[in-house]
Amino acid sequence: MSLVVVVLAVALVLGWLGGGTLSRLGEVVLHRRRLVLLALLAQLLGTVVGGPVFPVGLVVSACLVTAFLAVNRGLRGTGLVALGLLANALVVGANGAMPVSRDAAARAGVVDPVVSQDLRHEPAGGSTWLPWLGDVVAMPLPVRPEVVSPGDVLVAAGLAQLVVAGMLVRRVRLPVDRQGSPRRPLPPVPRAAPPYPGAQPSTKEDPMAKRGRKRRARKKSAANHGKRPNA
């Protein structure tokens, strides 16, 4: 899709101009990545088999990707991508193929959808369900003009936001020790369990801690011996 490629290229440039790097983008943590693989397999199966299997595969693929984006909803742009995929799946599931507007195709300068032999698209007509969600947005790009749907626009915008945010967000780095390994905070020391159920935890001070405090007090008094106290 030419629109997605152009938008992602612009997003990379904006992220770089804002001080972002590709290394930060590679540090983005994604959960349940197997859902994306299953979505690709479902869409590939629908494309290869064709016929009524194509819209079913596209709907299943969109649902799997939406579930993946819901798990990673903390990342910016995932909401737009999920909304765009659901819009495309809805119009394809209702019509069996993506309806294409003749007027939009003429404005973009692409081949008439009736002449093309793409089974994934069909010309929009009076019996088309949800025609406003079909390919109605003309994109007269210089190299490869195309007609896209509002869902494609949402997907491209969400991916661009995800790329820019991933390049600009700074990760929190832990302090390192002399060997260069991250220094992590020590876990809290648990309190001693009561001797029997229902008993209150002991509030007595540890004898070792009391002895250490007395030793520090003696050292401090010895260090200040003979000195004039502060006024």
Image (spheres, helix red, strand yellow):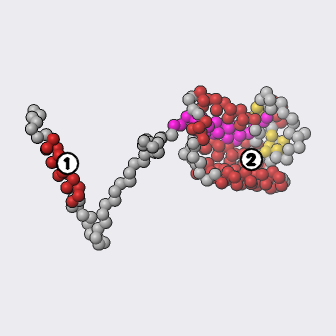
Q: Is residue 83 left or right of residue 99?
A: left
Image point (74%, 39%), residue name: 149
Q: Is residue 177 left or right of residue 112?
A: left
Write down the residue under mark 2.
91
Any part of residue 55 in sight: no
Q: Is residue 39 above or below residue 156?
A: below
Span highlighted in magenta in the image: 146-170
Give the numbered dot on residue 167. Answer: none
| Mark 2 or mark 1, whichever is nearer to me | 1
Secondary structure at numbered mark 1: helix
177 relative to 168, above or below: below
Give the quarter of the figure containing the N terminus. top right
The outermost residue toward the bottom is 196
Does any portion of residue 155 appear in the rendered image? yes
Report, in whole angstroms, how far the alpha carbon at label 2 lies from the one at label 1: 77 Å
Instruction: Locate residue 156, reporting x and y percent.
Output: 68, 38
Q: Residue at x 87, y 36 (%)?
A: 112
Q: How many marks?
A: 2
Element assignment for label 2: helix
In depth, the one of 226 and 5 nearer the eye is 226
* Quadrant of the snapshot with the C terminus: top left
Residue identified by numbered label 1: 216
